[in-house]
Amino acid sequence: MTYGMPENFLWGASTSAFQIEGAYNIDGKGLATTDVRHVPEGMADTKIACDHYHHWKEDVDLMAELGLKTYRMGFSWSRIMPDETLVPNEKGLAFYDRLIDYLLEKGIEPLVTLYHFECPQALVDSFGGWKSRKMIDAYVKYAEVCFRHFKGRITKWVTVNEQFIATAAPDLAMEYIEDPHERSKWIYQISYHVSLAEHKAISLLREIDPEALIGPVCSMQVIYPLSSKPEDIRAAAEAEEMQEFYLLDMSVYGEYSPAAYTWLKERNLLPETEAEDKAVLQGSKPDFIGVNYYFSSCAKYEVKPFGFDTSFFWAADDCRIVRNPYMKPTEWMPHGTDAEGLYYGMRKIYNRYRLPMIVTENGIAVSEALGEDGKIHDHYRIDYLREHISQVMRLCEEGYPVFGYCPWSFMDVLSSHQGFAKRYGLVFIDRTDTDAKECRRVKKDSFDWYKKVIASNGSEL
Ligand code: BG6
């Protein structure tokens, strides 16, 4: 057993493209699905977000001041490849050239997500997006452009962020379908297409840049049985299987587990496949697994009509996801927070896949506004991060290969569903949902704290 964090541990921080960039329609960028989806009145949208497109240099300077070793960021697919012609947009690539080169100049290694919840709307309009197999070719073409263009500069790639959410969240991958069975059928079909695209991209990277590493980022589901009743234990096992493991199994092994296959078959939800798919799915393997984790929950057995009533993302007929009565809800996290869940979840992932892991997202959402002193004293965020980093340390000390930790988020971002009402950042963005102001950057107390953590390689928590 070793003590402390490994040398070269990648202390990082995360963002995604559509949640920070803004500049949604300039320099040749096409509209993304996240640019056109319905945003409730009074909530910020992607048009400006944090205006990172114009503040990128200042943002990288802040990252360097923080001491980041890695920056987990996303590319906007529609900035690089705006439409169905699949012709790359030189100005879009030039923006990322500037950003990546400056990160490297500052000694910060980019870890880049290719697909984080958005794609060009033109692909949806012309052939239905992920509902169609044409999307697999479009994604692979986009990945190829990125791999060739950034070869040698980007050495760690993420294929897809949270396939579970990306394929099932209302209006991220398809239009809303009322009937839960029909909707689920499409979710599993879309997800199957994403798995094919992911494996094709991994194989392609091996050819183009064999030195580079690539892996998926999962939305880790830590689901405890609500009681020790065997039915609740089964409900929790099925929930983890169908909300996390079936997707990781597809990423790593290229097949469903017997449990997932049976679950889908019994509900007539198996996707349509083609004979040559198996070779594609089993022809490559990722190098690592990225883990996004915010909180845990519980599952209880309950026979009910098949529906999405316990989760936006997963319809079931014998399981209900509920709050763990031992966790205290927070303002924006009704399930509360559970640092130990990070430990147990990652332990399970390692036991099943034996791949190196990195925490790619972990954070607490809070409503925040500048105080009278012009600052944000976010002791609650420091507590949350400290508790979770301790669990990462515990994993490292026990010998689990965790090579990095990235809080969500480097700066406040446009939340995936709640605009700027809730915030996760180490850096405050001085704007509200209705007034973008100048998007001034203000370091929170957690920034100064995390800086010390990084400088001491975790010994000053
Ligand atoms: C993850 C996503 O699901 O959770 C992020 O990868 C997202 O993009 C984060 O922002 C927090 O969720 P939300 O809905 O609070 O923004």
Image (tube, rainbow, N blue to C red):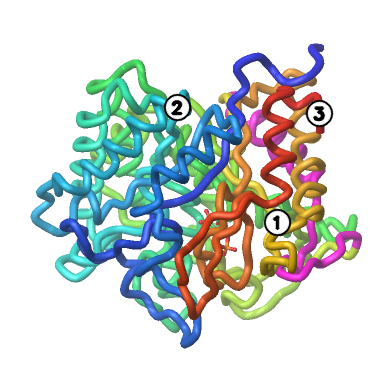
Question: Residue visible at 90% across and 55% down?
Answer: 228
| Location of residue 112 in the rendering, given as x and y in whole percent from the top left corner | 40, 38
Question: Mark 1 or mark 3, which has the lower sequence index?
Answer: 1
Q: What range is drawn magenta here?
A: 326-354
Say if the magenta span includes residue 332. Answer: yes
Residue 319 visible within the image: no
The residue nearer to you, when weighing 293 against 203, is: 293
Q: Hey, what amino acid is under mark 1? A: Ile
The residue wearing badge 1 is: 364
Q: Nearer the viewer, mark 1 or mark 3?
A: 3
Question: Residue visible at 53% across and 47% down?
Answer: 246
Question: Mark 3 or mark 2, which has the lower sequence index?
Answer: 2
Q: Quadrant of the N terminus?
A: top right
Element at badge 2? loop
Q: Nearer the viewer, mark 3 or mark 2?
A: 2
Q: Hey, what amino acid is under mark 3? A: Glu
User: Relative to 136, is 101 above or below?
Assistant: above
| Location of residue 335 in the rendering, given as x and y in whole percent from the top left corner | 77, 64
Residue 91 visible within the image: yes
Q: Hey, what amino acid is under mark 2? A: Lys
Marks 1 and 3, how far apart at CA? 21 Å
The residue wearing badge 3 is: 460
Q: Quadrant of residue 155?
A: top left
The residue wearing badge 2 is: 106
Q: Is residue 274 left or right of residue 295?
A: left
| Location of residue 365 in the rendering, given as x and y in whole percent from the top left corner | 68, 61
Counting other residues with Cα less than 10 Å from the Cα at mark 3, is it few (<14), some (14-19), or many (20 or more)?
Answer: few
Element at badge 3? loop
